[in-house]
């Protein structure tokens, strides 16, 4: 609990200081993660999201969606029945992945730490208010002299 408190307090300190080192929002964090900017991801165990990927077996075009667990079946069915956006082929392969697993794979490539905290704790509820995820960056990517 002490470590959980410290990491969440550090995240909020960075967010509130306008240093540019504290961010939240899943899409923004994924972009920063892919660009090796994230030092630590803090997320709650209540995030409940899945990553759905559709890949065309003809032209290899890939589309990605991040959705709530409850919408997985509906979304996968829709993607499987839709033609490729690039070549209009119906030969589409759809896969799904837990968002924590996806973030872990991206993090392993960049040396990013992941901290999963309880969503019911006091500090977990603070992170829940950020959409269940926040990140501390290595540097401010928007900083210029």
Image: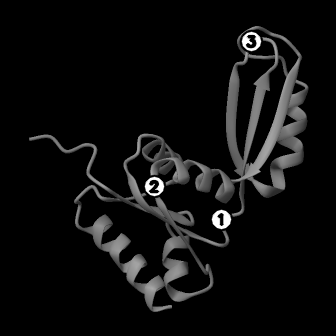
What's the mark number on residue 11? none
77 or 145, nearer to the observer: 145
Q: Is residue 34 above or below residue 10?
A: above
For label 1, the SS is loop
Q: Residue furthest left?
A: 145
Point out residue 52 in the picture as x, y percentages from the top left corner. Answer: 75, 41
Earlier-in-chain disc, 3 versus 1: 1
Query: In this rendering, would 12 be left or right of 93?
Result: left
Name the front one of labels 1 and 2: 2
Task: Report the residue marked by disc 2.
Answer: 111
- Crowding near the residue tagged with mark 3, few <14, some 14–19, many ≥20 C-alpha atoms within 10 Å: some
Q: Give the residue drawn at x 71%, y 11%.
A: 86
Answer whether labels 2 and 3 touch (C-beta < 8 Å).
no
Earlier-in-chain disc, 1 versus 2: 1
70 or 14, nearer to the observer: 14
Point out residue 109 in the picture as x, y percentages from the top left corner. Answer: 52, 47
Answer whether labels 3 and 1 touch (C-beta < 8 Å).
no
Name the front one of labels 2 and 3: 2
Query: In this rendering, would 107 be left or right of 32?
Result: right
Q: CA distance from mark 1 to mark 2?
A: 22 Å
- Crowding near the residue tagged with mark 2, few <14, some 14–19, many ≥20 C-alpha atoms within 10 Å: some
Task: Report the residue marked by disc 3.
Answer: 59
């Amino acid at each position: 609990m002490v470590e959980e408190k410290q990491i969440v307090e550090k995240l909020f300190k960075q967010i509130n200081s306008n240093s540019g080192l504290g961010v939240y929002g899943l899409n923004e964090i994924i972009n920063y993660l892919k660009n090796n900017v994230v030092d630590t991801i803090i997320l709650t165990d209540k995030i409940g999201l899945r990553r759905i990927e559709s890949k065309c077996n003809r032209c290899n075009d890939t589309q990605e969606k991040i959705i709530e667990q409850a919408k997985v079946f509906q979304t996968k069915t829709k993607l499987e029945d839709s033609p490729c956006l690039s070549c209009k082929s119906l030969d589409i392969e759809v896969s799904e992945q837990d968002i924590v697993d996806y973030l872990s794979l991206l993090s392993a490539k960049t040396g990013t730490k992941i901290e999963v905290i309880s969503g019911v704790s006091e500090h977990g509820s603070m992170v829940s208010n950020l959409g269940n995820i926040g990140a501390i960056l290595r540097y401010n990517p928007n900083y210029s002299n």
